[in-house]
Image: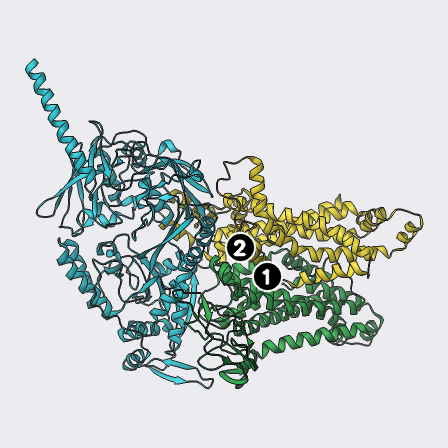
Chain colours: A green, B cyan, C yellow
Amino acid sequence: MTQRRKLTRWLIVLVFLHGVVAAAGFFAPYDPVEQDRERPYLPPMRIHLIDAYGHFHLRPFFYPLRLRKGSFDQYEEDTASAVPLRFFTRGADYRLLRLVPSRLHLFGATVAARVYLLGSDAYGRDQLSRILYGGQVSLLAGLLGAGVTLLLGALIGMAAGYYGGWRDDLLMRAAELFLALPWLYLLFALRAFLPLTVSPLEAFLLVVVVTGMVGWARPARLVRGVVLSVKELDFVRAARGFGASDLYLLRSHILPETANVLLTQAAILVPQFVLAEMTLSFLGLGVPEPMSSWGNLLASLQQYSVLVSYWWMYLPALAIVPFFLGYLGLASALQQRSSAYKIDGESGWSPT
Amino acid sequence: MRKERSYTRRRRFALSLVLTCASTVALTAKGLPRPRQTNAQEELLALPGEIGRSGGRLVVSLRGEPKTLNPLTAVDAPSREVIGAMQADLVHINRSTQLTEPALAKSWKISRDGLQYTLALRPGLRFSDGHPLDADDVLFSFRVYLDESIHAPQRDLLIVGGKPITVRKLDPQTLVFQFAKPYGVEERLFDGFAILPRHLLEKPYQEGKLAQSWAPSTPANEWAGLGPFRLKEYVPGQKLVLERNPYYWKTDMKGNRLPYLDELVFLFVPSADAQVLRFQSGETDIITRLGAENFSVLSRQQRGFTMADAGPGLEYNFLFFNLNDLGEKPSADFTRKQEWFRNVKFRQAVSAAVDRDAIVRLVYQGRGSALWGPVTPGNRRWVNAAIPHAPRSLERARTLLKEAGFSWSTAANGETTLFDPEGKPVEFSILTSSSNADRTKMATLIQDDLKQLGMHVQVVPLEFRSLLDRATQTKEYDAGILGLASFDADPNSDMNVWLSSGGLHFWHPSQSHPSTTWEAEIDRLMEQQLATAGYDQRRKLYDRVQEILAQNQPMIFLASPDILVGAKNSIANFHPAVLEPYVLWNVEQLYIRNGPENASR
Amino acid sequence: MRYFLRRALHAVFLLFGVSLLTFLFSALTPGNYFDEMRLNPQISKATVAALRAQYQLDRPLPVRYLHWLNAVAHGELGFSFAYNSPVGPILWVRARNTLLLTITAMLLAWLLALPLGVWSASRLGRAPDRILSGTTATLLVIPELVLALGLLILAVRTHWFPTGGLVSVGFESVSPLQKLQDLASHMVLPVTALVLGTLPMLVRHVRASVAEALQAPFLRAAVGHGIPRRKLLYGYALRAAANPLISLFGFSVGTLLSGSLLVEVVMSWPGVGPLLVEAILARDLFVVIGGVLLSMIFLVGGNLLADALLYWADPRIRTAASAK
């Protein structure tokens, strides 16, 4: 019973987190590609309730930052003008889930003074917005990639387990082959040697498909294991005796049994694929400018000057942690739920 | 007998009196270095400037590894930097004054018709291995520079008036260079042409192995040069160590033979950031050509070192479009794009939309200058001040585009797109070098600027060599951002860029004959200024070239960075210049200041 | 013995398959690298001609594959444009650097994971176990990239550790002891990142396997016999739990070359990772292929090692194999 509750709890957490990212347009105050060339590398703004004179204000506010005299990257608060934070305000246009146009944002400021809760990057773009929209890219890559892999893995595993014989041998040999490939390296190499002038969408899809195609081996083996054991169950044999076709058996009897394995694998694979996309983007082989992804948000940290002077550029790294926590929790809850599951070297979480 | 002796004695006395007066004058006078004789054999060059103390080791970081020590084949920056400290030329351009000075040649004469240059070699000089230098070495050097089978990168510079220059020897210390046409650059030509040791390289040349000679792993005894330092040790992947050349032909005003330093160590570091780290931790003594952000970081913590902004350099960054004639190869897609690029109003519109101030502010942190032409404000002698510095104006850009037949339309989601006269949306990609963060930043800024005009631009970072490959060989690209840093302030150093037949004429390189009237005009003007003597005349011609470039905008000039360098406080005679090599141009005069921590290095 | 031979043959077959894939991939990429080489005046025409002959560009694919296999077997892995030298020497130096890091990290991780996992399993469900589980769970959710960057920021801010590179300047001229110290100080951060990345999973696996083994009846009997606790845990339980751990060990060996890519890039450690990334961006084909091939050899070797170790350690497999 507690297991079920745990599962539900993790699911709720994940749904909430994904909801925030999916509704990035609402939660983010600004357009992620909108540059503000007067304010590059702005540190995170502080939200105050008590102003410089010691008065308490009910509505939180912030002081706009301006450049210190004679400096190009040192800012100071302009305590003369306090800008109140507005909630449920109208801001830049966006489309919720690419369908519903809207202008409503959770919070914002005035047109003249922008609020940078997590600071800005080299072009003055709001980091908070970029993290939220970047999450869309990275998470989608993870989900789609895991989907492709699981689909491939399920198909191949079922075919191998059900038909057995030479087909099984061949497919499992192929699986071993793919398991032996250093997929991260291959991923890079494949990505780099393909045409470079692809649109952002094409680049993204490429990443997804390639990561998906390389990782099917492990799920395939697990599915095959399940199919092998289910195949011999009495009721399945009985159905076959009654003249059920292969497809019927696969669809109605065997597939439901593999669902457990697939779900657990999904919870493990999604973070791995998100990481893969992040790694690619971090190294410059993922989504191009001006699109943001969690990976390329961290890429600027490769420059020494950024590492030393602009610590807030590290924050995207921390945004990932709750998502991974959610997935890991879900995975372990699922694993505990299925007693047929043992943690052995195969089904564990291994990044490479 | 006695009469003669007294005569000689008086003569000798008179001579020494003259010499003392002359040397006193030389010591007290400032300006051009004067020759100085220490013994009857050698004629050394005495440099003005602070007198230093001998000893010490200087550690400099190199971004990358030198591929070769051979001046005939070195094209990459690390190789050139190292070779600069190991070789010497006949006439040298003083990086600080930007004027020529005698070097290995103690004097020269240009004939009245400008076709003959007679150079007198400094007598008694020796290579770093002790072998004497004479005119035969010079003959040999220029022979291999001109040899077509070797493909020396400097070969093109020696072709004047369509014909290679010829050299002949008058006597062991005098050479005559013959030009087919008068050469506006005059003796500046000789800067950078290292004089090679015939006694070591003649044999490989005859065996056809000259281009492969002098890899960095060459044993020290197979190498010789006339520069302040000679090869000592090479550790692949880590460093190159040079030691003081005991036969170096320069002294300071007190007669001490230069260089002061005992050792010059080049450390190979993989990136600009690694250079900063090493400098900060004190592992290297000098850092040169910093990016603005790193400069700020280091300036904030000046502990034991000083950072310096030497002012605007000669580098100019630009955006260029693919205007090549590609025959039947290109797709219909690209042909359409080229229609846009070929329209001068399109290019002018792009130039009007680019926010140069933002580039200077965001990319260079204010340490740079906006450019509307290839000549930077740092090049005061040649910059054409009459070129309009039009401020950014999206209105003007839109007007230009409208005149060119473009139109806009707004989609349902609020995005405005620019459409060409045939109704197709304007989209193209800009290639930039992935290793150059500055230019990639510029590309992102321009991408946003052009978005305001409704153009959809993709930024594609590419490895530098692949980028060059695409731009000059395969010509498969839409637009690109590159930067060039002339090695000399003289317009001649960029001939290859402005001549339509040039290999660096990026928008349409290596043309057999100019494809537009304005390119033909530029060709004519550049050839003319090449053959004209006299600064004023050449200035007028080059001004006109800059005007034509501004009108037609084949390259949209963006910005130029200042030269930012730094050195430890213990390094003396540190006078950064804006010409390459920015800090090591006077390496023979650099020395380590007295101090307990510098005693044993 | 036969079992071992079969597994070895299996590994060889795997290598062939994998090398074929790599070769195909290389053969299908666009661009003619030899044209570019010809333009480089430093590479003599003889070298280009020799390489062309070696790669047999005009022959059909199967013939080229065989020739390529032959070349690889002789250790000739092609020519790098970026470094202007044959790939082999560059790759070996970098591989050595990477292995230095990963072997240290792996040994450290295992040396820490075994006692921690066993200790945790022996106190299952109680406070120490829960604290450890919580810590490993926290570490697990932090991706390696984040860890490495975080450590780097720490280094930059505190100046306690060098921020990158293999050794400091003047490495050659100091005493061997100082050399060791210098190398060690440069290794601290990357090794920490690697260990923190792999330790949590290892601890979990050890804990799970040992916990399961502790349920076995024979162990309860051993307790009844009065065997001391330490011997129980390490001599009996761990041994019984060894199977999946040995596979995991073999797997760890397999990722010795490829698992540290991100850490090396972030910490500027001159290993195979940064080499590969540069080569990919520079489209330096032969370096990429060489790197991929080398890491594939490690992966397959690791699997083979796991098989061999299992065979040697677990008598059940030996009897099962000989019974077949």
- Tell me the element at label 1: helix
Residue indicated by mark 2: C156
Q: Amino acid at mark 1?
A: Val
The image quadrant that residue B192 belongs to is: top left
Residue in the foreground of this view, choosing between B259 and C26 = B259
Chain of residue at mark 2: C
Q: Residue furthest left?
A: B3
Q: Amino acid at mark 2?
A: Val
Disc number placed over residue A39 in the picture, else none = none
User: In the rendered image, which quarter contains the C terminus of chain B?
Assistant: top left
Residue B595, picture quadrant: top left
Question: For the residue labelled by badge 2, is the local secondary structure a helix, a strand or a loop?
Answer: helix
Which residue position is annotated with label 1? C146
Callout 1: residue from which chain? Answer: C
Are the residues under marks 1 and 2 on the same chain? yes
* Residue A72 screen position, x and y as percent: 41, 65
Q: Residue furthest top?
A: B1
Asked whether, in this view, residue A123 is left or right of residue C204, the answer is: left
Tell me residue A149's x, y (percent). 63, 67
Position of residue A328 in the picture relative to residue C315 (left or right): left
Q: Which residue is found at the position 80% from the left and 55% from the top?
A: C210
Q: Nearer the viewer, residue A266 or C184?
A: C184
Tell me how far mark 1 sits from mark 2, CA to CA: 15 Å
